[in-house]
Amino acid sequence: MIRSKPMAGKKGRAARRGEPPKGSKPIKEADGDLKRKRDAFLQTFFQRGAALTEELVVENRRLRLQIEGLEEEGASLKTQLASDDAIRDLLKKIGHLEREKARLLSAVHEHAEITNRFADVESELESFANLYVASSQLHASLRVRTVVRNVRELLLQLVGVRSLGIYFVDDAERHLVPIASDGVDLSSLPRIELHATPADSVTAVVERAFLTGVPHVTEGPIAAAPAACIPLEFSERVIGVIVVYALLGHKKEFVPVDRELLKLLEAQAGSAIVSAYLLEHADALLPSPDVLRKACA
Amino acid sequence: MTSQYTCLVVEDSPMMRQLLVLALSRVKSLQVVEADDGVDGLRKLATGKFDIILTDINMPIMDGLKLVKRVRSDPAHKDVPIIVVTTEGSDEDRERALQLGANAYITKPIQAPQVIAKVRALLKMDV
């Protein structure tokens, strides 16, 4: 327990007697001082309170602003998150579409390949059909007239030839002699003397094809006659030529199947004509089995 | 399989006839009957029902134009589709054939896909 220390000296005693201390101000003056002090204290107190309140208001405003900022930031982050999700979805969709595009392109490519393949097969089929028909018709008759007619027809109907001439060799005379024609008068076709200086370019081509056995078939658009010159083979020798002077107007060049047909004529037309001739001159008599057996032995 | 349609091919050239028949053999449900010329064609028309006719124009005895005229004047066959097979340079014949009632024409040298397409179109067949 703290005991208050009694006032010591003259001041203490005077106070106890109720007398103002010696040298102190009078009471009224003291009250005025106290009041001033109190007022000053109160003023200071309120001023500090006001300052504190002011500070609190400012702080409150700052915090409110901060909250507002944070709320805005939060909203922005939320938006960004949503936007990120949307972008992710879009990227996923783009990936899916890219795969779909690749699949479709592959399908289109495959379809184009199938179409090309189909066109190739169609062309091959046409080629085989033409060759089959040509081959079977070439040997369908054993009459010279019919065989030659079939050769001409094959060229006119299947190849699209406008004019042609068929030449046969005259071994004794060393001449190529025209024996049939179409689209051009037979009498207008010249006899071609072999090993003579060719009279013109057509004759030169015909002679060269006959002597070398190498066919002449124009590549690309046909500009000059003859369009083709095909040697006729028979028993490993050349016995004549087919000269194609011109093709039909709408046919500008030979197509692959035409070349196959010309090869077929080169290999078989000569044999077909000669065989037909020989059979006609044998009165179409069939050989006896004995003769054939001996021939096979 | 029974044939749903019958086609008459009138062509004097055995080679062309064989080629046409070969091309038409690729058309499903189509039976082909061959005739050598117009007279033979009319004879065969009289013996059966035909859904389409393919005829050459230049033929001996009776040509394709006369055949078209006769078919169109015959109540039994007046509505049968006719395709004429022509050669290049025979524009007048082609025009005449169309005027007489032919439905279409094909120019020689023929191409099988073209023949097949025209026949299918006139018979309204699914591809």
Image (cartoon, rainbow, N blue to C red):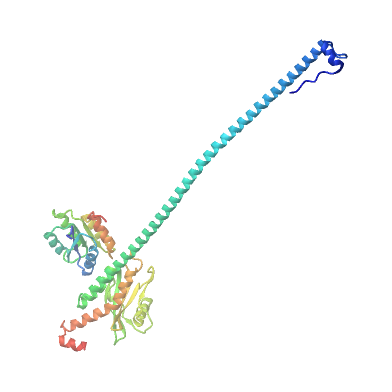
Residue that sits furthest to the left in the current view: B47
Location of residue A169 in the rendering, given as x and y in whole percent from the top left corner: 29, 83
Quarter of the figure with residue A134: bottom left
Write the residue at 36% across / 82% down.
A212
Location of residue A198 in the rendering, given as x and y in whole percent from the top left corner: 38, 80
Can residue A110 be seen? Answer: yes
Can residue A245 be seen? Answer: no
Image quarter where the N terminus of chain A lies is: top right
Location of residue A285 in the rendering, given as x and y in whole percent from the top left corner: 15, 83
Residue that sits furthest to the right in the current view: A23
Left or right of B9 in this view: A71: right
User: Please, is residue A86 above or below residue A60 in the view?
Assistant: below
Location of residue B16 in the rendering, given as x and y in whole percent from the top left corner: 23, 67
Quarter of the figure with residue B92: bottom left
Question: How many tags in the picture?
Answer: 0
User: Please, is residue A42 above or below residue A188 in the view?
Assistant: above
Image quarter where the C terminus of chain A lies is: bottom left
Depth check, front residue: A206 or B55: B55
